[in-house]
Amino acid sequence: MFGNYKVITLCGSTRFKDAFFEVQKRLTLEGNIVISVGLFGHSGDNEVWENMDEGTLTKTKEMLDDMHKRKIDMADEIFVINVGGYIGESTRSEIEYAVKTGKVVRYLEASKA
């Protein structure tokens, strides 16, 4: 299957950094091109937010959210890192966007509902 790779964008809370890396490795070894987050603001990349005033912080967050939706545009599907079933507001927005644009949505953990 060389040359015909599915593109998968990872979505989820950046607090689950280890899970992102584990899923990225697994999906890559399964023969997929994996697009991930650029930084882990909730899990160690604190310098991203340091010394930002509220206005700059808001604009940066909006830019990162929009950038992730562009990553979804490039993908065939998204894979949601929902450790413990957790899906935050940003991830929920990304899932809604993916569904609206016809992307397949898969989850790390099955829904408990």
Image (cartoon, grey):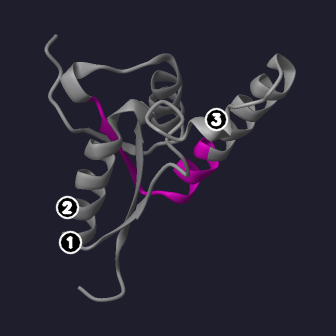
Residue type marked 2: Arg
Q: Is residue 47 left or right of residue 106?
A: right
Verify CB contact (< 8 Å) between mark 1 and mark 2: yes
- Residue where numbered disc 3 is placed: 65
Q: Which residues are magenta?
A: 68-82
Q: Position of residue 29 (x, y in %)?
A: 20, 72
Residue for point 14% across, 28% down = 110
Tag shown at residue 29:
1
Q: Residue 106 is drawn in which quadrant?
A: top left
Classify mark 3: helix, strand or loop: helix
Q: Is residue 40 left or right of residue 25?
A: right
From the viewer's side, name the closer residue of 42 and 73. Answer: 42
Classify mark 2: helix, strand or loop: helix
Q: Residues within 10 Å of mark 1 (few under 14, many from 20)?
A: few
Q: Residue 104 is drawn in which quadrant?
A: top left
Residue type marked 1: Leu
Q: Real-space Cα distance between discs 3 and 2? A: 25 Å
Q: Residues within 10 Å of mark 3 (few under 14, many from 20)?
A: some
Q: Position of residue 64 (x, y in %)?
A: 66, 39
- Residue where numbered disc 2 is placed: 26
Residue type marked 3: Asp
Residue for point 35% across, 75% down = 5
In the rendered image, residue 69 lying in the magenta stretch gets the answer yes
Q: Is residue 14 left or right of residue 27?
A: right
Give the mark, 3 or 2, whose residue is nearer the N terminus.
2
From the viewer's side, name the closer residue of 28 and 16. Answer: 16
From the viewer's side, name the closer residue of 32 and 46. Answer: 46
